[in-house]
Image (spheres, rainbow, N blue to C red):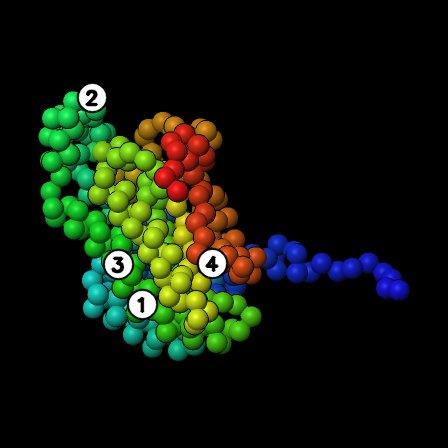
């Protein structure tokens, strides 16, 4: 009969959430939610490459936040462009011949400037003409640009980086590489997302893209999961960021938690998915939203 106390090393926080073995790419990693994810990974030992179109933003992030024990490296480029995504993957292959373990498709835009309620008011929803006139102010290029970045960009990046993710899994056989797509609760809620139908529709599409990619990548053992945040401080929600690449919100929260998302909320989410504790998760969506989906029913 066995005697003595059992050790539970595999259940310690280090075993579950350690990311020191990870090499990651985070698109839009210089500001907002992307920066929160980058900080969480770097603070726990990961090597992180951040993409973005603004070199000065990437440089400032490295200057301020590459404080270890991991490290941050700039990978400038436009992820909404197919050839740029292919180029970034080739550049990464030269830098990391053993592959990578994590791709976070976080870069996103919102272009519903003509219809969002915060700056254009809300139409009378009992008047068909008022609804029609309000939402017809949206322009085709606003829809096209939104989908090009929020949906198609994640598709190009996932496909271009898939061989590197598979290589990372081969080099680290105890860990299955992963794509994490950052979408939004807007893609799961009914309504127009406060006058932002293009943005909400693009995030719904990105969430479904996650499901399709997870199925497509299953045989090469690369996982795909989805983070659908509520409101976090970012350039998208606040309109700008400061010298520290951080944003502040000047509005009131409407979720049951009565607050906006904190850096620590996003950090806990990505460390769970990226650590060994998250290895059993594939084709799943996490909702760090403070209970927003309790306020407005989701469609699925």
User: Crowding near pointer 1: few (<14 within 10 Å), some, many (20+)?
Assistant: some
* Pointers 4 and 3 in contact (C-beta within 8 Å): no
**Badge number at residue 153:** 3
Which residue in the structure is indicated by mark 2?
Answer: 126
In the picture, which quadrant includes the C terminus?
top left
Image location (x, y in percent) of residue 144: 16, 51
**Badge number at residue 282:** 4
Q: Earlier in the sequence, mark 1 or mark 4?
A: 1
Q: Earlier in the sequence, mark 4 or mark 3?
A: 3
Residue 157 showing in the rendered view: yes
Image location (x, y in percent) of residue 263: 44, 44
Q: For mark 4, give the secondary structure.
A: loop
Q: Earlier in the sequence, mark 3 or mark 1?
A: 3
Cα–Cα gap, marks 3 and 1: 10 Å
In the picture, which quadrant includes the N terminus?
bottom right
Q: Residue at x 39, y 78 (%)?
A: 97
Cα–Cα gap, marks 4 and 2: 42 Å
In this view, the residue in front, 238 or 79, is 79
Q: For mark 2, give the secondary structure.
A: loop
Image location (x, y in percent) of residue 30: 33, 53
Q: For mark 3, give the secondary structure.
A: helix
Which residue in the structure is indicated by mark 1?
Answer: 159
Q: Earlier in the sequence, mark 2 or mark 1?
A: 2
User: Crowding near pointer 3: few (<14 within 10 Å), some, many (20+)?
Assistant: many
Q: Residue at x 45, y 34 (%)?
A: 291
């Amino acid at each position: 009969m066995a005697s003595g106390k059992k050790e539970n090393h595999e259940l310690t926080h280090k075993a579950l959430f350690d990311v020191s073995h990870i090499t990651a790419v985070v698109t839009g990693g210089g500001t907002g939610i992307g920066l929160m994810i980058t900080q969480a990974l770097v603070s726990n030992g990961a090597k992180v490459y951040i993409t973005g179109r603004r070199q000065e933003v990437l440089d400032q992030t490295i200057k301020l936040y590459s404080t270890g024990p991991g490290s941050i490296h700039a990978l400038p480029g436009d992820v909404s462009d197919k050839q740029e995504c292919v180029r970034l993957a080739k550049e990464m292959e030269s830098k990391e011949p053993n592959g990578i373990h994590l791709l976070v498709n976080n870069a996103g835009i919102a272009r519903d400037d003509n219809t969002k309620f915060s700056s254009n008011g809300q139409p009378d929803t009992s008047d068909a003409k008022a609804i029609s006139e309000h939402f017809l102010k949206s322009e085709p290029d606003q829809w096209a640009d939104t989908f090009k970045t929020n949906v198609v960009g994640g598709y190009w990046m996932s496909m271009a980086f898939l061989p590197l993710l598979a290589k990372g899994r081969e080099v680290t056989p105890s860990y299955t590489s992963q794509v994490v797509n950052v979408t939004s609760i807007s893609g799961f809620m009914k309504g127009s997302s406060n006058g932002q139908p293009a943005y909400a529709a693009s995030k719904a599409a990105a969430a479904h893209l996650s499901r399709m990619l997870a199925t497509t990548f299953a045989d090469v053992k690369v996982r795909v999961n989805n983070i659908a945040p509520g409101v976090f401080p970012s350039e998208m929600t606040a309109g700008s960021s400061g010298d520290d690449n951080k944003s502040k919100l000047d509005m009131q929260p409407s979720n049951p938690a009565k607050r906006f998302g904190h850096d620590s909320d996003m950090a806990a989410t990505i460390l769970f998915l990226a650590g060994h504790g998250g290895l059993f998760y594939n084709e799943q969506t996490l909702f760090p939203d403070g209970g927003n989906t309790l306020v407005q029913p989701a469609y699925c």
